[in-house]
Amino acid sequence: MSYWPLMGIALVVIGFALRFNPLLVVVGAAVATGLLAGLDGVAVVEALGKAFNDNRYISVTWIILPVIGLLERYGLQQRARAVIAGMRGATMGKLLIAYLGFRQITAALGMKDIGGHPQAVRPLVAPMAEAAAEQSHGELAEAERDQVKAMAAATDNVGLFFGEDIFFAIASILLIQGVFEAAGYPLTPLQLSVWAIPSAICAFVIHAWRIRSLDRRIGSARA
């Protein structure tokens, strides 16, 4: 048994430590692993091509990135800020709590890709949250602006993570069902989904409190 193919792992670690291009590091490590395993160059390229073709559906999501880039170039973030600026009583807390509820409900219905960092948080939610915070508290410091952006991203994460488990056809529920069944506890996906509801409610309450705390903390800094 040869351990030389494991050199590919070392190449990945070294490449990331030296901050080389991640794509080049991964492809280079894959090619090196194939060659060290005794494959010829053509076989390595064939294996890479087959893996890409078998998982090409993953790359479909990349199509949205240039679309978002074009929208941002032509003022999507500025329009989002203007919408919030024209709303009376809009606050960062209210906006992000509303988005948290929206994200959890849609994820619970199986629409987990309706939000997300590249397609929703960066171009819309984060700029709107910044505008709402500025409308309530005035000009933000750079550190406060970063905190608002981070909270917008965290809100999307929490909403998706605790909302999607309520949808009984999601992969995580099926995985949990398989683990319980293997351990001798036959449960249906619907049973697991129902027991995910209390966790989702607790997550909503806790994260909503964190959002309001940040909103109040920014306001108290100017008091």
Image (spheres, rainbow, N blue to C red):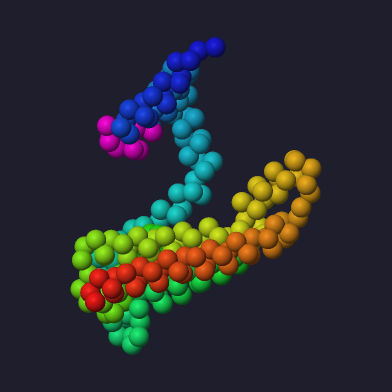
The picture places residue 86, in percent across and down from the top left corner, at 30, 85
Residue drawn at x 36%, y 29% as measured from the top left: 13
> Image point 71% across, 49% down: which residue?
177
Please, is residue 24 above or below residue 109 in the view? above
- Residue 52 lies, with reference to residue 124, above or below; the image says above
Residue 15: quadrant of the picture: top left
> Does residue 32 appear in this view?
yes
Return the x and y of residue 29 as percentages of the image width and height: 39, 27
For the C terminus, the image quarter is bottom left
Which quarter shows the N terminus? top right
**Magenta span covers which residues?**
18-26
Q: Nearer the viewer, residue 213 or 161?
A: 213
Determine whether 1 is above or below 28 in the image. Answer: above
Q: Position of residue 119 (x, y in %)?
A: 40, 63
**Which residue appears farthest toward the top when viewing the image?**
1
Residue 165 as seen in the image, left or right of residue 29 = right
Residue 82 appears in view: no
Q: Residue at x 24, y 61 (%)?
A: 143
Residue found 33% across the figure and 34% down from its top = 16
Quadrant of the rendered image containing residue 70: bottom left
The extreme bottom residue here reads 88
Q: Percent position (x, y) of residue 158?
A: 49, 60
Judge whether residue 91 is colored magenta.
Answer: no
In this rendering, the count of numbered labels is 0
